[in-house]
Amino acid sequence: MNDKKTASKTRNAIIETAGRIFAEEGYSKATVRDICRQAGVNIAAINYHFGDKKGLYLSVLKHYQEISLKTYPPDLGINETQQPEEKLHTYIRSFLTRIMDDGHPAWFGRLMAREFTQPSWALDILVKETIRPSFQLLTEIVGAILGKSTKERVVRLCSMSIVGQCLYFMHSHPVITRLYPGESFGRKQIDELTDHITGFSLRGLLEGKNKNYSEVKKCKKR
């Protein structure tokens, strides 16, 4: 019994430490040696519990995905009775919360956000199981705002721009703090950023609703 408790404690320590390090540094930069050192375990424990670094990363993703799903529902809290503009606000807030909130529930979002800039072999799995369904939901919301006559490519580009805004405030934090010392974006700024990104995006979407997107036409001519 004690052996099982010890093994479980060791495994949990590795998962927790690895989750934080993978989220902060990405899969490639994170090292098994560093994870074990900070977790206070022997490197052999990785082989025993997870097989190798890939096995550890998959276990970390699965573990924190389960925590994330319990905290943040798959439908992102969107209510079908909401207007498309309200759904967009809910979507953006959920997205920001997933990557900027404190604590374990946000680590899966941060792991995914890290894959956007430092893709690993696990990206295909994440796209299939998590990213694609989430992005599909966003394109449906954006499509409803722009109208049925809007070209699919325009909807897609607009959706990508919205995601880009959300990720910017996370990944560009080192640049932002150098441009504006003392400026910070984290959990406390989620509501402010949600209102800003939603308002900014809606103005762009509504203004361009009845206009031609010349860049899209240029892409089609190539």
Image (cartoon, rainbow, N blue to C red):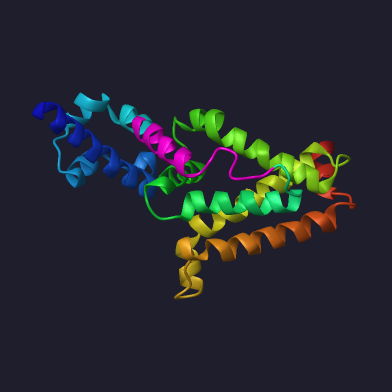
Magenta span: helix, strand or loop, mainly?
Answer: helix
Q: Is residue 91 left or right of residue 122?
A: right
Residue 123: x percent and y percent?
A: 49, 33
- Image side of residue 204 versus residue 26, left or right: right
Magenta-highlighted residues:
59-79
What is the number of callouts on the image?
0
Q: Residue 143, image x and y in percent? A: 78, 42
Task: Name the spot of residue 25 as percent of width and height, x first.
Answer: 36, 48
**Which residue in the rendered view is the most extreme toward the bottom?**
181
Q: Quadrant of the C terminus?
A: top right
Q: Is residue 65 magenta?
A: yes
**Residue 186 seen:** no
Where 28 falls versus 214 (above or below)?
Answer: above
Q: Residue furthest front?
A: 81
Residue 113 appears in the figure: yes
Please name whichever residue, 205 or 85, is drawn nearer the observer in this view of the structure. 85
Could you tell me which residue is drawn at 27 percent across and 26 percent down?
A: 50
The N terminus, quarter of image: top left
Classify residue 130 by image quadrant.
Answer: top right
Give above or below for 149 relative to 169: above
In the figure, 2 relative to 41: above or below?
above
Q: Residue furthest left?
A: 2
Quarter of the figure with residue 79: top right
195 vs 28, nearest the viewer: 195
Q: Is residue 122 left or right of residue 147?
A: left
Q: Is residue 107 above or below residue 206?
A: above
- Which residue is drawn at the image coordinates 39% and 38% (left, top)? 64
Q: Residue at x 42, y 35 (%)?
A: 66
Residue 120: give x, y in percent of width and height.
44, 35
Examine the structure image and report whether residue 19 is included in the region drawn in magenta: no
